[in-house]
Amino acid sequence: MKHDFSELRLDRVTRRFAASGGHVFNALSDMTLTIRRGEFIALLGPSGCGKSTALNCIAGLLPLSGGTIKLDDTRIDTLPPERRGFGMVFQNYALFPHMSVAKNIGFGLRMRGVASSAIAPRVANALKLVQLTGQEHKLPGQLSGGQQQRVAIARAIVIEPPLILMDEPLSNLDAKLRLETRSEIRRIHRELGRATIYVTHDQDEALSLADRIVVMKDGVVQQIATPQQVYAEPANLHVARFMGYRNVIDLAVIGERDGRVALEGPDFRLSGTRKLPLAGARAAVAIRPEEITIAGASDGDNVIAGRVDNVEYGGRDSLVDVVTAGGTRLHVRAGTHLQPGANVFVHVPAERVLVYPAEA
Amino acid sequence: MSGAGPSQGANRAPPGGSAAAKPHAWGDRASAIARDTLAARAPFDRSLLLVAPATAFMLLLFIYPFLYGLILSFEPAEGGALANYRKFFTTDNLWPTIWTTLRLALPATLINVGVALPIAYKMRVKSRWQRWITTLLVVPITLGTVLIAEGMLTYFGPKGWLAQFLQLLHAYDGSIRLTHNYWGVLISLVISGFPFAFLLILSYVTGIDPVLARAASTLGADAKAQFRHIYLPLLAPGLAMCFCLAFVQAFSVFPSAVLLGAPAGPTRVISIAAYEAAFEQYDYSLASAIAMIMGFVQLIIVAVVLWLRNWFYKGPVTGGKG
């Protein structure tokens, strides 16, 4: 077990499960990823996308069906979890219910044969880091959910692991606590500088915490990029959908030049920015609701006429559905003044209309 | 007990005990509120009547016979109120039955719990074999003690299949005596008691969230350490409970002690003494006294084990929400 490393390399890591009827189901296919020292990586995707499978493979809780995992030059995918020495935080905390907070946090050190006189100060430090000083003699059952998760984090970091693995650690917390604990995780990462792999299905969590995001779907990595890139330049339609591009519209291609694509709908024209090579006469455009604005006039490029159909009040603004005469529905984030039935014009800049090949 | 009202039910600690329940002061408050509104709305909750049959059942079939026997034991045919008890502890073929019974019941219980634990622990992971092995191990519970005794006499007897088989192989040519002695009764207690202990422990083991063991493994605990530091402490209260139940069952051994043992000597257990007093000497008073002593010995062992159980954590065995 090492306390530090410069690179963790996943090379074509694959995990298959036997499904019913003798079929084999690829929960994770050929995942290749290099994690650098101190980096915060988020594995992001909908449930069943293979992100937790990947994490369990790295932790050693699931054997690989193929591929290798290397920590610098040491191959670790054949080691059992107890010899990898990665700290892991579980979704349901997984605190030992019969041990006090201090015993829980000190467990990893005890398993490493650290003398009990040396364990106490390290546990105290970890408690201070997660701001739970004074709670060391309580049992986990006496703590709130947020406190339990902080104990779990302290338990994972006190062993000074080279890598910290977190499996949706915030999903059992309520909205307010989730935000607080998220900041806490960010702060702890900044203070310790330990490489962290964080599994989540929440794009906000991934965007706010990660240095790099790995977007996954159906066991396949879709994009590995910084939060800014994933947010603004999704690699494909799956990523776009997942990152909040709620408008995905299938349109006819009528022209293409220098990456700028002219498209035609039943009753409107749009020009957009090509993100992937197009094939065929049709393409799909992806647009974020917040990048569509209500236009004052009907003239100009990329202006579409429509009628307000549905308004969802959202406090600062509303989510408005605008339907064109031809029946195309656009989700628009707009001011709170619009009423259903009103005729409006909406506008979206061509560089924010992302054009991808049409889906089969 | 069965007479408890709904408000008391709401106030009761969650299964497993007080340690985990205490901190939730809000739970007490909630039940206090529930109690208030219930009390205000319905001075008498008629659904309470539903416990009446059970209460009557308990009174008629348990409490009354018990008290009857207790009083009867203090009314011997001759001598003072304690004459039966004095007689039991001074008669040479009566008081040693306590030790004879303990000598059978304690090892049988230890074997049952001790063997069931590792097997149940292995069976906690769902596998293709799990169902088959579980079924196989549980079958003896469906057989009565008499049927088991019949089978054992055929199988383990001096001319039984086991002896014939061993002699055929020339593995062991000496005489094998596994019936009509201490061993016969012990084996029978293990056969009939094991499935019970196994099922009980299996349910305790599978009740422990496996994610705890995974968490322990990421913290550096190998399989042995996971068992020692996670499973064993969490199982301890359940094991104590299982020990008590298995012990009480084994301590009241009667049919196999007669059929497979040597009821005149080495396996003259306390229930045989009580039986003889009641149905051979027709001294119901003495028989009642022996039954009371039998119950008292069981009570002592159970009390000791349950006292030891207090040293362990007894709360819920999951690692948090989820």
Image: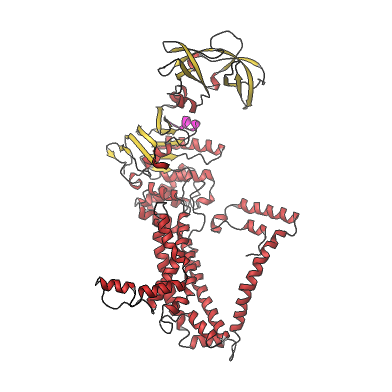
Front-lying residue, B278 or B248: B278
Q: Residue furthest top?
A: A299
User: In the figure, B112 relative to B208: above or below?
Assistant: below
Quadrant of image for the N terminus of chain B: bottom right
- Can residue B236 be seen here? no
Q: How is the image coloured?
A: secondary structure
Label count reads 0
Query: Is-magenta flag for residue A35?
Result: no
Front-lying residue, B134 or B66: B134
Query: Is-magenta flag for residue A211?
Result: yes
- Can residue B178 be seen here? yes
Front-lying residue, A188 or B38: B38
User: In the figure, B177 relative to A75: above or below?
Assistant: below
In percent of width and height, residue B161 lies at 33, 72
In percent of width and height, residue B89 lies at 49, 85
Magenta residues, start to end: A201-213
The quarter of the picture where residue B70 lies is bottom right
In percent of width and height, residue B276 lies at 51, 85
User: In the figure, B42 relative to A286: above or below?
Assistant: below
In percent of width and height, residue B212 lies at 44, 50
Tell me what residue is drawn at x 37 percent, y 34 percent: A29
Q: Residue furthest left?
A: B170
User: In the figure, A33 relative to A131: above or below?
Assistant: above
Q: Residue furthest bottom?
A: B78
